Image (tube, rainbow, N blue to C red):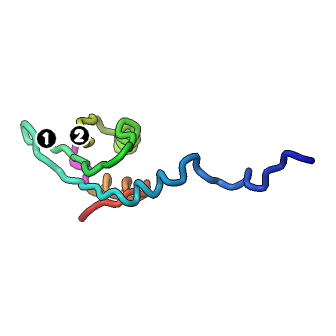
């Protein structure tokens, strides 16, 4: 008897429900103006156990900007609202507006 598993070649994630969680979250993306006229993109609406630090890191790298995680939202420096919406949608998140 061999140990060949017919499902080894399938690309099944460790937690198949994680993608479902992403799709059911309704995220909000808005641009705020901070001190000295600086723009800041704020992403909110996360539920459950979304790894905000990891997501923020991915977004910061993709945008080439700084940012931080606060409480239940992510803040990114600069006026990147349109691009953030595209990146979140590409990662399987549902974005309002």
Q: Residue at x 38, y 44 (%)?
A: 50
Magenta segment includes 76: yes
Magenta segment includes 13: no
Res 97 quadrant in image: bottom left
Q: Which residues are magenta?
A: 75-81
Which label sits on residue 14? none
Real-space Cα separation, disc 1 to disc 2, in angstroms: 8 Å
Point out residue 88 in the picture as x, y percentages from the top left corner. Answer: 37, 54
Residue that carries the numbered disc 2 in the rendered image: 77
Q: Are marks 1 and 2 in contact (CB under 8 Å)?
A: yes
Instruction: Report the front residue among 94 and 85.
Output: 94
Residue situated furthest left in the rendering? 36
N-terminal label among 1 and 2: 1
Point out residue 16 in the picture as x, y percentages from the top left corner. Answer: 54, 53
Q: Is residue 32 visible?
A: yes
Q: Residues within 10 Å of mark 2 (few under 14, many from 20)?
A: many
Which element carries disc 2, helix, strand or loop? strand
Q: Residue at x 92, y 47 (%)?
A: 1
- Position of 6 with respect to 62 (left or right) is right
Instruction: Report the front residue among 26 and 91.
Output: 26
Q: Is residue 76 visible?
A: no
Residue that carries the numbered disc 1 in the rendered image: 38
Q: Residue at x 10, y 40 (%)?
A: 34
- Position of 2 with respect to 21 (left or right) is right
Point out residue 23 in the picture as x, y percentages from the top left corner. Answer: 40, 59
Instruction: Report the front residue among 49 and 26.
Output: 49
């Amino acid at each position: 008897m061999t140990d060949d598993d017919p499902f080894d070649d399938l690309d099944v994630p460790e937690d198949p429900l994680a993608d479902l969680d992403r799709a059911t979250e309704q995220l909000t993306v808005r641009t705020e103006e901070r001190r000295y006229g600086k723009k800041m993109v704020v992403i909110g609406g996360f539920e459950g156990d979304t790894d905000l630090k990891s997501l923020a890191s991915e977004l910061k790298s993709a945008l080439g900007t700084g940012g931080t995680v606060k409480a239940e939202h992510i803040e990114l420096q600069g006026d990147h609202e349109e691009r953030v919406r595209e990146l979140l949608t590409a990662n399987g998140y549902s974005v309002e507006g």
